[in-house]
Amino acid sequence: MSSARSASEVPPPDRPAGSRLGRRNDPDRRDRIIDACLGVLSREGVAGTSHRKVAAEAGVPLGAMTYYFDSMDELLLAAFTRFAQTISARFEQRMATATDAAAAREAVIAIILEDVFNDDRELVLSHELYTLAARRPAYRSITTAWMKRSRTALERHFDPATARVLDALIEGLTIHRALDSQPGDSRDVELAVTRIVME
């Protein structure tokens, strides 16, 4: 018996042993799949999202999907985690720019008016995540971590009790403003935030 390995046993030059074809030449594929999943979710919702639609959106072979994600649930968890982290980072950046109490109050107002749910895509993704989190603990851990980061950012400038109330106000006002067919008055937001932080 020959000691030489057969051609089928030797990995091609551009494919290291233990890897799948194309992975080395496409290192960003997993990230593209996650971003594509968020795109599909924003248009189709969780119920309308499938491996096939995400693969088409990402421009990857359908068979590649299960290499990176064993199930649709695993992909959804990765996608919603990325979404929540993106919103949290934006929130933290805004609060980090505040240098005093007045600037912190203005930062909270800006978060409501400009940062959270600043387009329909983010609004839809948020509510898809909320629906899953209401039913399933794995997704609730994402929203819990999201709220914790928001409150921690607020606590740079406000006491914990005020930070908790402000966090709830931010969430509620942004949803109301996003879903109301009539544009809200920014002065109402300023008044609400001022009443909480000045008490």
Image (cartoon, rainbow, N blue to C red):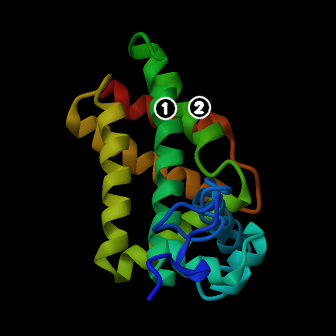
Tell me what residue is drawn at x 48 percent, y 16 percent.
103
Tell me what residue is drawn at x 38 percent, y 45 percent.
167
Tell me: residue 158, above or below residue 171.
above
Q: Is residue 185 left or right of residue 167?
A: right
The residue under label 2 is 110
Q: Note whether residue 92 is visible.
A: yes
Checking the image for residue 187, the label placed there is none
Cα separation, mark 2 vs mark 1, equals 5 Å
Tell me: residue 106, above or below residue 87.
above
Q: For label 1, count other residues whose C-alpha is less than 10 Å away and answer few (under 14), some (14-19) or many (20+).
A: many
Q: Amino acid at mark 2?
A: Ala
Tell me what residue is drawn at x 51 percent, y 67 percent.
19
Furthest-top residue in view? 99
Q: Amino acid at mark 1?
A: Val
Checking the image for residue 108, the label placed there is 1
Quadrant into which the N terminus falls:
bottom left
Image coordinates for residue 191, horizontal then vertical, percent = 52, 33
Image coordinates for residue 189, horizontal then vertical, percent = 56, 38
Tell me: residue 192, above or below residue 103.
below
Q: Is residue 56 left or right of residue 136?
A: right
Tell me what residue is drawn at x 76 percent, y 57 percent.
182
Report helix, strand or loop for mark 2: helix
